[in-house]
Image (cartoon, rainbow, N blue to C red):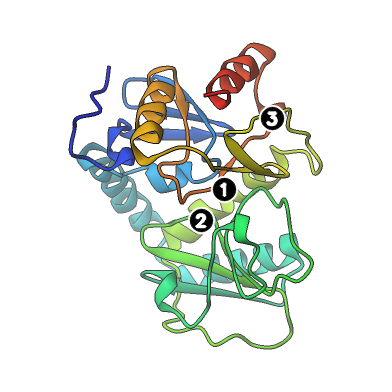
Amino acid sequence: MHSINQPQSLITLLPSVKRVRGGYLYDINNRRYLDLWLHNGTLLQGHNDTGVIKLLKNTLNQTALMPYPNIWHQQLIKVVKTKYHASHVYIIEGDSSNSNASFTEPWNQSPLGFYNLRAWYPLPRDISLARLAMTLAGYHIIISFTEKVQTIERETILPAFLARAALKQLPLFHHSTPLNPLSKLSSNQWNHYGLYFQSTHHSQESYHKLFIEALDNGILLPPGLDHTGVYISTLFSEGQQQQIERIFQK
């Protein structure tokens, strides 16, 4: 069990994640978590020392086998443009918030930038720019939906092993989720927009307790009041949906 007295950020309470599949995360002890911070699971691989070592080993192994980054980079750009019907695709290194693009959480629906576009839903009609929710060792995939070329700083070539890893993830990223799945959520404690949700009536302390309770029950909530989650009920069994919805009543 976790203690609420630990002086840690919420995400550090999650054990090292070794595998991400659909709506599930698996830690190094093979425990499964229902992922309601959907597709941000890719951010969590390597979020502590054990995970970093695992990623480093994979990096070294794959880099030796794939020494030609331009080929994989160009293929990734082509696939992303096709999947999203995008006008332009950019790769930047470092924090995407430091670029000239303006990003917000999807809940806020900024026409300037859509932060962490996930599962291709919802896609606001006035969106011009998005960051794909696929963090690759400090590199970010930025998608532009307008013919107007965005000013993106530090555009770079994605290393071969990361471009190949992204290509492997894209089919799961899109096709594991129906285009119009329905959520059964109904709670006054949370604000809902389609499949997206965000806490509205929790204090920092109460949300901290709820996050830990959910984690102890094998459910990963967004790690903070300012983070948006996604609940796609069709990813989970009826029993798992009931377990999730009990958490949403608190």
User: What amino acid is found at the position of numbered circle 3 in the picture?
Assistant: Leu
Side of 179 where 236 appears, left or right? left
Which residue is rendered at x = 43% and y = 72% of the image?
A: 97
Say which residue label 3 marks.
185
The secondary element bearing badge 1 is classed as helix
Picture quarter with the N terminus: top left
| Residue 128 vertical position relative to residue 187 in the rendered view, above or below | below
User: What amino acid is found at the position of numbered circle 1 in the picture?
Assistant: Lys
Q: Within 10 angstroms of label 2, few (less than 14), some, or many (20 or more) residues? A: some
Residues at marks 2 and 1 touching, judged by CB atoms closer than 8 Å: yes
The secondary element bearing badge 2 is classed as helix
The secondary element bearing badge 3 is classed as loop
**Whole-percent x and y of residue 132?**
57, 60
- The answer to which image quadrant residue 71 occupies is bottom right
**Whole-percent x and y of residue 21?**
54, 33
Q: Earlier in the sequence, mark 1 or mark 3?
A: 1
Say which residue label 1 marks.
168
**Whole-percent x and y of residue 154?**
41, 82
In the picture as drawn, the residue positioned furthest to the top comes out as 239
User: What amino acid is found at the position of numbered circle 2 in the picture?
Assistant: Arg
Q: Earlier in the sequence, mark 3 or mark 2?
A: 2
Q: Disc 1 versus disc 3: distance between alpha carbons?
A: 31 Å
